[in-house]
Image (spheres, rainbow, N blue to C red):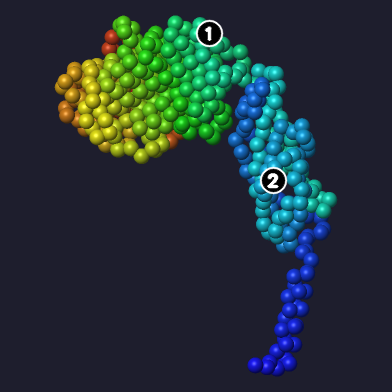
Amino acid sequence: MQHPRWFFTSIAALFLLLCMGGCKPEQFFTSNNTLIYSKDTVWFDTVFTRKTGSTYPISVTKIISIKNPESLPVKANFKLAGGEASQFRVAIDGESGTQINNIEINGKDSVFVFVQCKLEPNNTNLPSIVLDSLIADVNGKTTNTKLAAYGWDANYYHDTIFDQNITWNNNGKPYVIVGYLGVTQGATLTINSGVSIYASAQTSIYIGGSLNIKGTATDRVKILGDKPTWAPQFLPNQWRGIHFVVGSTNNKIQFADITNATIGIRVDSLPVNAQNNLTLQNTRVQYCGQACLLGITAHIDATNCLFADAGSYTFLGLLGGKYAFNHCTFGEYSGIASRTDGHFAITNTLRNGNGVLLKHTSLDCQMYNSIVYGYNKEELEIDQTNLSPFNFNAENNLLKSQNPNGILIKPNTLNKDPKFLDTDRGNYQIDSTSAAYKKATTFGTPIPIDLLGNTRKSLSDLGCYEKLP
């Protein structure tokens, strides 16, 4: 078939136009361009300085955007003012370093900048500020954003076992645990008032000997995740928790705040003598992914303590044991995990995943002047077998409960709002309209102060906090 001459002429013209379009040079904005930063300063709050001989710790990653306000694309060069000595690092469009060149930003488009810092020791007790800036250059026009972090020197312990007595004092620097920390039988770790301890991810504190935490009302001991900033303070599962293993006895924790763990405190096995595994006084255990307090056939006494905001249980007493709670608050409103069971749970059994009874032993739980409350209709989870003794003696408490199986025999207040001040922010103090206000009585030795060390009224309140006049 023959084609007319005009057909070939049209094809040639089209081919020429395609070639001309393909050879057209890419256009960039060539005048002074001012990039727009989403933040004028990137703050890292407080970051621990580098552990000697290690790259740990590296900060969280901050993200900012840089926008090209022009309609044409630009090519920008970025550099840290501190150069190779900078304690900050940036990554842009998959490239990282202290200087990154020829980053193309399309018209009206943005690039994201990822910023981290790894701070060097400053040999001071208090956090010291570290400054730098990220400079962008487009056609000779420079703009910048400031980078700032407070670096805090620390006492580091990495995969450490103590086989003799040791004392940690408040020397102005926090203690940071990387990996595990253990105390063997016959040894005692004493932690004095004002000490702050930060645990890295996967950290467990194993106590085979004894732990003695000696906080005071004015200088509490703090144990929490290793990101010392405001934002993560409510986040669980930042470390594994404190685990008192079989054989550990004579443990005492007073005026301490233990937060952000998976299981805040776990106690295994009754001691062979009549001693307690653990005594807790004026202590807060909060924001734990699974449980605040777990006892497995353990002996635990707790007074003026808060156990709150856990994924499953504020307290779980498993396979019997001996427990005593006076002026304690158990509260769960966090929504860390979806749950249908009550968050205060006790059982003298051990069952498999199908509910088959595997083992049983005696349980004795005494609870006075305490509060157990949450968003479920039933917050007491009870599982018992008559094959072993089961004694749950609860008296004069404020409980969210339908009294399962008539387990509550002595007088308690049921399903009356404790009116906690702010459960969204973990504040379980009460006001004068609370059903817990001025409802406490004395069982045994009077409790003269509350969790914070405040003096209790002559007619005091239920729970760990006293409503002050």
Q: Is residue 101 left or right of residue 326?
A: right
User: In the picture provided, is 334 more to the left or to the right than 3?
Assistant: left
Q: Do the residues labelled 2 and 1 touch (CB within 8 Å)?
A: no
Question: Is residue 449 at least partly visible in the picture?
Answer: no
- Note whether 394 is above or below 24 in the view shown: above
Residue 430 picture location, percent across and down: 38, 27
Say above or below: 455 vs 356.
above
Where residue 322 appears, as percent x and y from the top left, is: 28, 15
Q: Residue at x 48, y 15 (%)?
A: 182
Of the pair 349 and 352, the residue shown nearer to us: 352
Identify the residue at image location x=36%, y=39%: 338
The residue at which mark 1 appears reads as 166
Disc 1 residue type? Ile
Question: Dot 1 surroundings within 10 Å: few (below 14), some, or many (20 or more)?
Answer: few
The amino acid pointed to by label 2 is Glu
Farthest front residue in view: 1
Density class for disc 2 (Cα within 10 Å; few <14, some 14-19, many ≥20) is: few
Which of 313/2 is in front?
2
Assign the N terminus to one quadrant of the image: bottom right
**Residue 24 placed where, x, y %?**
78, 69
- Toward the right, the furthest residue is 140
Q: Residue at x 34, y 25 (%)?
A: 315
Local SS, label 1 = strand
Instruction: Say whether disc 2 or disc 1 marks the residue closer to the N-terminus.
Output: 2
Relative to 56, 324 lies left or right: left
Q: Quadrant of the C terminus?
A: top left
Q: What element carries label 2?
A: strand
Based on the displayed image, in which of its 4 quarters is residue 126 positioned?
top right
Q: Is residue 18 above or below residue 182?
A: below
Quadrant in the rendering for residue 45:
top right
Task: Identify residue for label 2.
Answer: 95
Q: Which residue is drawn at 78% across and 64% down?
A: 27
